[in-house]
Amino acid sequence: MPIYEYMCSACDKRFNLMRSFQDSDQDATCPACANSAQRLISRTSFYSASAPDSAATRRDQANEKMWLAERRGEDWNKKHPDPLKAWREEREKACGKGPEAWVEYSNELKAKEQKEKDYSTYQGGES
């Protein structure tokens, strides 16, 4: 039996009833105020019965995954506009601007560490 939607003109309440085709044109009794209610023309939804593993279904699922991934990426970019900003600011304070200066600074640190290592080895050898 189909389900029909009704609306009471007295109290404006909407309700659904399961009725046979023969009784579908008759007015129904409102469950709230017991007045006569008229049948409404409801919007319907259509469902396509296709196999769950059909090509169209798989394509739709893939498109949905891509769409969701793009939205997650957009959300991430809004929350984290520049993830390396703090690191860049620290590098700029320590050694100046630009990647070339960072490489030079890094090489100077390595040379300094090597010099300290060599000096400590030399000091240890004399004692």
Image: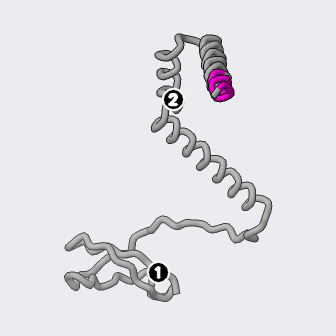
On the rendered structure, is 19 left or right of 114? Answer: left
- Kindly identify the amino acid type of the residue bearing the numbered disc 2: Asp
Question: Would you call the spot at circle 2 few (<14 residues within 10 Å), some (14-19), or many (20 or more)?
Answer: few
Vertical side of 54 occupied by 29: above or below: below
Q: Name the quarter where the C terminus is drawn.
A: top right
On the rendered structure, is 95 left or right of 41? Answer: right
Residue 56, visible in the rendered structure: yes
Residue 122 in magenta stretch: yes
Quarter assignment of residue 18 = bottom left
What residue is shown at x 29% (from left), y 85% (from top)?
A: 29
Residue 99 in magenta stretch: no
Residue under numbered circle 2: 82
Count of picture labels: 2
Give the farthest residue toward the right: 55
Vertical side of 55 occupied by 117: above or below: above
What segment carries the magenta color?
119-126
What residue is shown at x 27% (from left), y 73% (from top)?
A: 13
Give the farthest residue toward the front: 127
* Label at residue 13: none
Q: Secondary structure at mark 1?
A: strand
* Label at residue 3: 1
Q: Where is residue 55 shown, x and y percent of the image? A: 79, 60
- Please report whichever mark, 1 or 2, sits nearer to the chain's N-terminal start: 1
Taking depth in this image into account, of 127 and 80 the one nearest to the observer is 127
Vertical side of 125 occupied by 107: above or below: above
Q: Secondary structure at mark 2?
A: loop
What residue is shown at x 44% (from left), y 68% (from top)?
A: 41
What residue is shown at x 32% (from left), y 73% (from top)?
A: 14
Q: Main SS type for the magenta part? A: helix
- Kindly identify the amino acid type of the residue bearing the numbered disc 1: Ile
Q: Where is residue 77 shown, x and y percent of the image? A: 52, 35
Q: Where is residue 93 shown, x and y percent of the image? A: 47, 16
